[in-house]
Image (tube, rainbow, N blue to C red):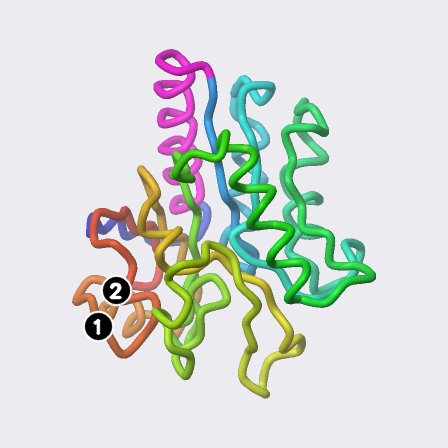
Amino acid sequence: MELNNFNNKELMSIAASRYTKDLIDKKIRKDNEFTLALSGGGSPVRYYELLAEENIDWARVKIFFVDERNVPANHVHSNFRMINQALISKINIPESNIFPLNTENQSVTDCSLEYEKNIKKAFGNNLPRFNLIVLGAGPDGHTASIFPDADPYIEENRIFIPATAPSQFDVRERLTMTLALINMAHNRIFIISGTGKKSIVQGILDQNPLIPAGLVNPDTTVFTDSY
């Protein structure tokens, strides 16, 4: 793990935004396309706002979602809603380059299967290795919608699955990338902000197997103001 610790959220978000732009620019110059998967939560909001201000050729970027709550796209708890407000609505990107989940009018099982097919199709039915996956980590150590009381290896033959959050969460029905898909990516970053998360950051650095975030491929860069 590469740790980048900052005094505040603004400095952290600026650094993560510049890191992402450099990664996108370099990949586009080489291969003409960049695949990006984004997470919800409070920590990356400012990062997304700053990323929208960067001079990026968004026509060559495809945006996917790491996980989602089983709510309509305009719901207050929707990851798509937050990411759309902070980033997508502010950039010049073709609608065909955005891959939201269709959470309305179908079960989480059907939705996860559909999204898995959409991911595979977008990668030409090749092994789906994202150029960058943006992750967060909750106070309980969950990442994506992989929670501590779930077996992260139970469906390693899948790349996108239904998930259930613990009872304290507002929306329990979730959909999420599997740990296998996350760990296959060419690059991953954690964006972690807020008080009380120092032990979680340490668990990630120590690869603590008791928290899902500690099971993420150690070839990952951490941006935080919490350490």
Q: Is residue 198 above or below residue 62?
A: below
Looking at the figure, which quarter contains the C terminus? bottom left
In x, y percent, where is residue 97?
63, 29
Q: Residues within 10 Å of mark 2 (few under 14, many from 20)?
A: many
Residue at (58, 63) in percent of width and height: 175
Residue at (28, 74) in percent of width and height: 199
Taking the image as shown, residue 155 lies to the left or right of residue 205, namely: right
Residue at (58, 86) in percent of width and height: 168
Residue at (60, 56) in percent of width and height: 113
SS majority, magenta:
helix
Three-letter amino acid code at disc 1? Asn
Three-letter amino acid code at disc 2? Ile
In the picture, residue 112 is in which quadrant? Answer: bottom right
70 within the magenta span:
no
Give the residue number, with chain letter if any, for mark 2. Answer: 204
Magenta-tinted stretch:
11-32
Taking the image as shown, residue 223 lies to the left or right of residue 158, namely: left
Q: Is residue 115 above or below residue 210?
A: above
Asked if the residue at tag 1 contacts the one at tag 2, i.e. Cβ–Cβ closer than 8 Å, the answer is: yes
In x, y percent, where is residue 148?
39, 79
Secondary element under disc 2, as helix, strand or loop, is helix
Which circle marks residue 208 in the picture?
Answer: 1
